Image (spheres, grey):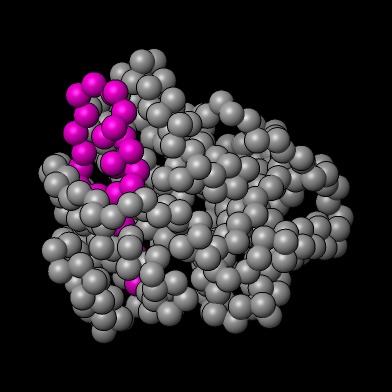
Amino acid sequence: MKVIIIGGFLGSGKTTTLRNLGKHFIDKGHKIAIIVNEVGEVGVDGETISSSGLVTKELTSGCICCSLKISMEFTLQTIIEDYEPDVIIIEPTGIAFPLQIKEHIELMDLGEVSFAPVVSIVDASRFGVEWKQIPKFIESQIKESEIVCINKIDLVDSEAIATSTQMVLGINPDAIVVEFSAKNADEKFERFMDLLTGESEIRQEREDLNSMEVSGVGAYAGEYSIKSEALHPDNITTMLVHILMDIRDKVKQINPDFIGHVKISFKFKDGLIKGSLTSSEGEPVVEILDEKGDGEEHLKFLSAVTKVQKEELVEIVDECIQEILEKEGISFEKISFQVHDEPNLITLDI
């Protein structure tokens, strides 16, 4: 069984990479399982992956390289016993250290396990800002990677791509650097997939770090149940853009140069729409992920940004969401969550 760990800071494009990678392995006839880890009590990415026709669940309420090590071991053992995959892909939260995860798994009694080279994904459109905001954290992620992917090259010019590559090699001269746009899944992305057939050789040379502390990220996640009349996708798209812009503008008052990821998914009668924001200078990106729908309606969100306290983030996010929902005349109720000890697993049908 092969384990592939896809790391990278918040908003770097891990989920898009994982979706295309999962489809690739399925097309090649592999039986795969995927673990998605999000730091908040509510997961957004699992639902996003499900929209591709992949059955998903998530491991939430912490980071699997820190507080959820035991949960991860239970999850892996359950996947192996119940599903018997030949490939397991792990997408840790963006504030995790992928090499720590690999070394924790190596200590587990999981039978014959091999590892693909450890991967970190870098967002070419904001790498310089990341380095200014959280240099120690970014340095650790890149130093402990064997493959570093310069993602979102469609958003920047050739000079920015070259600068990102030079910065990565300056931090880790031994890294294999690949440049692509994960959403395109073209020949450059295929080269990355070919590299994953190799074997990991990297070893950790320091004691474990607490990734939450090193990253300096405040995080808050939640869910609202929604009751509304028939909503048109255009109205939902506009609404998510306004929510994300309001959150961005208010967080900028605390940290003018914040980076991270604010994700909102809106499940309505006819489908699923996701909105995303990754920096103080970025613009919201909204996409329709599923046009089928199952009649369920809810809004899920995950916000994780640099140098903002959780208490401040809670106030900003709830206020911005509720103001827009009220303005649109949508009835809603905040769902309360309790953290459970039993972990979830994520599996993909073939």
- Identity of the residue drawn at 45% across and 56% down: 211
Which quadrant of the structure image shows residue 31? top left
**Could you say where residue 109 lies in the image, as x and y percent from the top left?**
29, 23
Up-down: is 153 above or below 268? below
Counting from the top left corner in percent of width and height, residue 43 is at 57, 43
| Nearer to me, 313 or 182 | 313
Check residue 146 for magenta coloring. no
Residue 111: say if magenta. yes
Residue plotted at (40% across, 54% down):
209
Quadrant (top left/top right/bottom left/bottom right) for the C terminus: top left
Give the image location of residue 8, x and y in percent.
37, 58
Q: Vertically, is 112 above or below 260?
A: above
Relative side of 323 to 74, left or right: right
Magenta residues (range): 99-126
Q: In the orientation shown, which residue stands out farthest toward the bottom?
A: 159
Is the N terminus in the top left, top right, bottom left or bottom right quadrant? top left
132 versus 196 height, above or below: below
Q: Nearer the viewer, residue 142 or 331?
A: 142
User: Residue at the spot x=46%, y=45% of the render?
Assistant: 66
Residue that sits furthest to the front in the current view:
207
Q: Is residue 50 visible?
A: no
Which residue is drawn at the image coordinates 86% and 58% (left, top)?
A: 326
Q: 321 or 72, which is in the foreground?
A: 72
The reply, left or right, for residue 243 in relation to residue 170 is right
> Which residue lies most toward the top here?
82
Q: Position of residue 283 (x, y in %)?
A: 55, 73
133 vs 255, left or right, is: left
Count of number-bearing discs: 0
In the figure, 236 relative to 48: above or below?
below
Locate residue 55 relative to residue 123 in the image: left or right.
right
Instruction: Decide if residue 82 is in sight here.
Output: yes
